Image (cartoon, grey):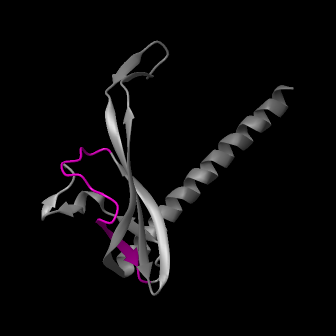
């Protein structure tokens, strides 16, 4: 019985390790694609939503808790077009909003020339009337 449990446990640990390794390799590969050649364009914001998270207690040890402060998360859904093909995604940020952004505003996006699906949105670079929309 114990040997079967050990096998299941080690299989689960190996599966998690393989998943984390694959995720790291993908992030590194995407960054290399962006570094090899990329272009910066402005994507159109399709929707902006805000989610407020209340203050809560987080368990950090067996008998220890830490108070987590309340924060508001801004989720930005955007679309950009490359060579007639449309790509959509979303990004979230916890930075406080200084100026309100709306549907139809633009967000800077950097995409890889080799594969436009590989991209990075830059919400901290959103500008309203030449002023930053988010605090840093």
Residue 134, x across and y down, in percent: 22, 51
The answer to whether residue 111 of the structure is visible from this angle is yes
Magenta stretch: give its range: 94-113
Whether 45 is among the magenta residues is no
Question: Mostly what secondary structure, the magenta segment?
Answer: loop
Q: Is residue 104 above or below residue 94?
A: below
Q: Quadrant of residue 102?
A: bottom left
Please state which of residues 58 and 1 is positioned toward the viewer in this rendering.
58
The residue positioned farthest toward the bottom in the image shown: 83
Please state which of residues 95 and 100 is positioned toward the viewer in this rendering.
100
Q: Is residue 126 left or right of residue 62?
A: left
Q: Is residue 119 above or below residue 3?
A: below
Which quadrant: the N terminus? Answer: top right
Q: Say which residue appears at 48% left-offset and 67% top-offset.
A: 88
Please state which of residues 126 and 16 is positioned toward the viewer in this rendering.
126
The residue positioned farthest toward the front in the image shown: 103
The residue positioned farthest toward the right in the image shown: 1
The residue positioned farthest toward the top in the image shown: 63
Q: Is residue 110 left or right of residue 135?
A: right
Q: Is residue 33 above or below residue 129?
A: below
Q: Quadrant of residue 37?
A: bottom left
Total count of labels = 0
Q: Say which residue appears at 72% left-offset and 35% top-offset.
A: 9
Residue 77, x across and y down, in percent: 42, 59
Residue 74, x across and y down, in percent: 35, 47
Whether 100 is among the magenta residues is yes
Q: Say which residue appears at 79% left-offset and 37% top-offset.
A: 7
Residue 94, x across and y down, in percent: 31, 44
The answer to whether residue 117 of the structure is visible from this angle is no
Q: Quadrant of residue 23?
A: bottom right
Q: Say which residue appears at 43% left-offset and 69% top-offset.
A: 79
């Amino acid at each position: 019985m114990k040997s079967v449990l050990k096998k299941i446990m080690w299989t689960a640990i190996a599966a998690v390790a393989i998943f984390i390794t694959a995720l790291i390799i993908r992030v590194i590969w995407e960054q290399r694609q962006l570094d090899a050649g990329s272009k910066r364009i402005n994507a159109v914001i399709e929707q902006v939503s805000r989610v407020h998270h209340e203050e809560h207690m987080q368990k950090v040890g067996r008998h220890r808790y830490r108070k987590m402060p309340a924060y508001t998360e801004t989720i930005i859904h955007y679309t950009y077009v490359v060579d007639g093909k449309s790509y959509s995604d979303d990004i979230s940020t916890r930075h406080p909003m200084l100026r309100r952004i709306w549907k139809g505003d633009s967000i800077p996006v950097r995409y890889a020339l080799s594969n436009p699906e590989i991209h990075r949105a830059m919400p901290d670079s959103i500008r309203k009337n030449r002023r930053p929309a988010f605090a840093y």
